[in-house]
């Protein structure tokens, strides 16, 4: 298949971004992309990617092999997990005042 000029330009722009990543960032990105591909190929796996900025109150959610309702339920469950992770080393509630 022959690529159009636009496809070639997009591919080059993507490669320029990849070249800016450190070796550790590339390894991490490779793992993320492999997991996303696995999710796309396995109907029993569901995932999402959440992107947010410090200065923007909104976030973007990209679902992978799941509905937006499934993603919302997963995020709700994760709230408990993150709260527990962040509270592990926290002082007792009476000591926080």
Image (spheres, rainbow, N blue to C red):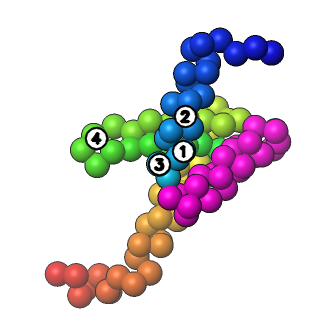
Nearest to the observer: residue 29 or residue 92: 29
Q: Label 1: which residue?
A: 18
**Inter-mark Cα distance, 1 to 3:** 5 Å
Placement of 28 over or under 91, stated as above or below: above
Region rendered in magenta = 22-46
Residue 93 is a magenta residue: no
Mark seen at residue 20: 3
Identify the residue at image location x=57%, y=14%: 6
Q: Does dot 3 land on a helix, a strand or a loop?
A: helix
Circles 4, 1 touching at the beta carbon (< 8 Å): no
Q: CA distance from mark 4 to mark 1?
A: 28 Å
Q: On the rendered image, what quadrant is the N terminus found in?
A: top right
Q: Is residue 42 magenta?
A: yes
Task: Residue at the far left: name it.
Answer: 97
Give the secondary structure at mark 2. helix
Q: Which residue is mark 4?
A: 57
Dot 1 surroundings within 10 Å: few (below 14), some, or many (20 or more)?
Answer: few
Measured in 3D between alpha carbons, the distance from the residue under mark 2 to the one under mark 3, in whole angstroms, is 10 Å
First in sequence: mark 4 vs mark 1: 1
Nearer to us: label 2 or label 4: 2
Tell me which corner region of the image, top left, top right, bottom left or bottom right, holds residue 96: bottom left
Q: x, y percentage for residue 74?
A: 59, 48
In the rendered structure, are the residues bearing label 1 and label 3 in contact, judged by CB atoms less than 8 Å apart?
Answer: yes
- State left or right for residue 73 relative to residue 90: right
**Depth check: 65 or 84 in front?**
65
Would you say the magenta stretch is mainly helix, strand or loop? Answer: helix
CB under 8 Å between callouts 2 and 4? no
């Amino acid at each position: 298949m022959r690529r159009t000029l636009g496809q070639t330009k997009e591919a080059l722009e993507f490669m320029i971004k990849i070249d800016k990543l450190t070796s550790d960032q590339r390894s991490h990105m490779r793992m993320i992309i492999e997991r996303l591909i696995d999710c796309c190929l396995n109907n029993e796996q569901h995932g999402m990617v959440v992107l947010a900025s410090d200065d923007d109150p909104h976030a973007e959610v990209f679902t992978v092999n799941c509905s937006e309702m499934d993603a919302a339920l997963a995020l709700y469950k994760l709230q408990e997990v993150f709260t527990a992770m962040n509270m592990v080393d926290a002082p007792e509630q009476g000591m926080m005042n």
